[in-house]
Amino acid sequence: MVIQATTSRQAQTGGRHRKQSSRRWNHLGNRTGRATIAALLAAFVLSIGLAVKLIEEAPEPLAEAGQSPSVSTAVPIQPVPSEPAGPATASEPRDLFATDDKGFVNSGARCDGKQTAAAIGRTERSVVVICAGDNGRYEYLGVRLSDNAILRTAAETTPTRGFLARTASATYAVSPSELLVTAGAMVVKKERMLEYRGPD
C-alpha cells in the first residue's frame, strides 16, 4: 500500500512539472516571435526612410556636353511694334559691326566671291547687306542679331535709292532711314537704321 501511494504522488508531481515546463517554453517562444517581428518592422521602416532620402537628394539630370536647344527654322511672321527712335547704346563695341567692301566683318551678312556691297545697313535687331554682282543683279543678305538667322534672296533697286527684296511670304524694303518688312498690307516690323551706307 505504501508503495502505491508514493508512486501515485510521484506521478502527479511529474505531471505538474511537465505542464509548467511546457508553459515556460510557450511563453519564451511568444516573446521571441514578438521580438523578431518588431526587428523586421524596424528594418522595413528604416529602408523606406533611406529610399525616400536618396530620392530627395538625387540631382536633376543635366544636358550632356555639346547638346544645345533645338531652334525652329520655320517661324510664322507676326507683326511687331515699330522701334522707338533713339541713339545706339554706347556699350556696343565698335569692332562688333566693322565693315569693309563686302559687308560686315566676321558676320553672315557678307557678300560672296566677286560680289561687292552696294549698301550696308544696321538696325538695333538686324544687319543688312545688298550685294552687287558682275551681272548687274542684286542680292539681299540679312542677319537677325538675336539668333544669327540669315535670309538671302534676290533684290532690286527702287527710285528712292533704296532696295526691295521679296520672299514667298514677305517683302523687305531697305532705305537709308529704315528696314521695313511687310506681308501684304500688314507691317511685320519696322526698324530704324542706326548706320547706313548706300549708293550716292
Image: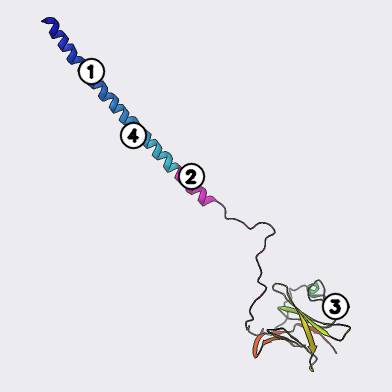
Quadrant of the image occupied by residue 33? top left
> Which residue type carries mark 3?
Lys
**Where residue 117 sits: x, y (%)?**
84, 81
What main secondary structure does the magenta stretch of the protein show? loop
Q: Which mark is residue 37?
A: none
Q: Which residue is mark 1?
A: 17
The one nearer the camera, 88 or 76, is 76
In this picture, residue 68 sits left or right of residue 4: right
Q: Which residue is mark 2?
A: 50
Q: Is residue 14 left or right of residue 119?
A: left
Which amino acid type corresponds to the residue marked 2 in the rendered image?
Leu
Would you say the residues marked 3 and 4 are in contact, meaning their CB atoms lie under 8 Å apart? no
Q: Position of residue 79 (x, y in %)?
A: 63, 84
Q: Earlier in the sequence, mark 4 or mark 1?
A: 1
The residue that label 3 is drawn on is: 102
Secondary element at image label 3? loop
Task: Assign a secondary structure to mark 1.
Answer: helix
Q: Residues under labels 4 and 1: Cα distance?
A: 26 Å
Label 4 sits on residue: 34
Q: Secondary structure at mark 4?
A: helix
Q: What residue range appears in magenta?
A: 47-75
Which of discs 3 and 1 lies nearer the camera? The answer is: 1
Q: CA distance from mark 3 to mark 1?
A: 115 Å
Instruction: Give, as a three-letter code, the residue at label 1.
Output: His
